[in-house]
Amino acid sequence: MQDFEDDFPSEAPSEYQKNTPFVTKKVSENEKNMRLDKFLVSCCPSFSRNRIIKLIETDCVKYEKEDRFADEADLKVKEGDSFVITLPNAVPAEPEAENIPLDILYEDDDLIVVNKPAGMVVHPGAGNYQGTLVNALLYHCKDSLSGIGGVLRPGVVHRIDKDTSGILVVAKNDFAHVHLSEQFKKHTIERVYQAFVWGVLKQKEGVVSSLIGRSSSNRQKMAVVTVNGKQAVTHYECVDIYPKVPASLIKCVLETGRTHQIRVHMSSLGHSLIGDSVYGVVLKSAPSQLRFFPRQALHASFLGFIHPRTEKFLSFEVPLPKDMADLKELLEKNYKI
């Protein structure tokens, strides 16, 4: 995903066209063991090194003779290697304000707390330039959103997946952005999620601690890895069980906030989230309402943090949205012993 306005240079040669693969020269004997980013800069002198690194990190560089991405800037190239670079389409320089209703839990001059519905993307990206939370906030807040996050992420200090519902805090000025970001960095923000998972957990509560990084088999997925990942810690507790499915309602408290963290961690335990089409499995014997639940059954139900200016602790809690509440009612009425 491209995060900022495309800085594709106007003076670049004609072969560097968006979405048209460009094949580099082959690595010579003198160039072997050179860092990938430096080699690509030598092939594309009109690109900055930062631009090249961004392309590498967003899976825009592949080996010409192998069906795999060259996804590490410090990777050492080998003699005879050549690479295919595909430039993504430019992202609009600035998202447009859109009059989209928001469920606002709290607002002052420094921040706004919202309850995001499932199906809404937090900030614009590939294929989602309209209808995002940022588009809605730009309309509601006018020009008061923080600029630190860049034009596509004004005020955004954290996010939840498109198909996850629940609470988000957004900074309305740079002062609040810096202070809230520091709390997330230090893991002092309190975040609680509720989720429905397949199966009955053997341990009713526990901690999952692992590295999470890109899956080596599918770059669109995250995975528990042993190297090249970021530390992720999830505390979980079983709230209720439905043995006749079997399924469970769990509560997860996050120490860290890695991409897809709860989904990856619960899948690693063998208890993937109901409705998770990426990391989940489906029990064929389960009722159709569970087998065809249209999203991962995950809800950010609680958020607590220190207000950047008043230094008072603020906390917010929202109940399960209707789709998950209906799912809970179904399970309790028909599948609980």
Image (cartoon, rainbow, N blue to C red):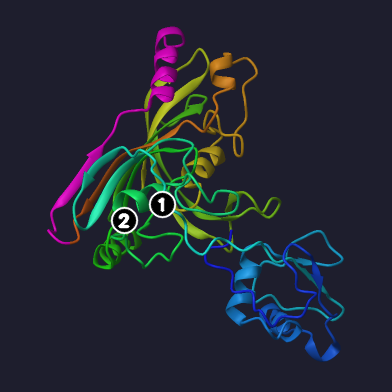
**Percent position of residue 142, x then y:** 31, 56
- Dot 1 or dot 2, earlier in sequence: 1
Secondary element at image label 1: loop
**Magenta-drawn segment:** 309-337
Identify which residue is drawn at 58% across, 64% down.
Answer: 228
**Percent position of residue 176, x then y:** 25, 62
- Asked whether residue 126 is drawn in magenta, I would say no
Q: Nearer the viewer, residue 56 or 44?
A: 44
Is 125 displayed left or right of 15 in the figure?
A: left
Q: Which residue is mark 1?
A: 97
- Marks 1/2: CA distance? 8 Å
Is 150 displayed left or right of 264 in the figure?
A: left
Depicted 91 relative to depicted 314: above or below: below
Quarter of the picture holding the N terminus: bottom right
Determine contact: label 1, label 2, CB under 8 Å. yes
- Asked whether residue 319 is drawn in magenta, I would say yes
- How many residues crowd mark 2 within 10 Å: few (<14), some (14–19), many (20+)? few
Q: Which mark is residue 142?
A: 2
Which amino acid type corresponds to the residue marked 2 in the rendered image? Lys
Is 230 displayed left or right of 53 in the figure?
A: left
Res 157 quadrant in image: bottom left
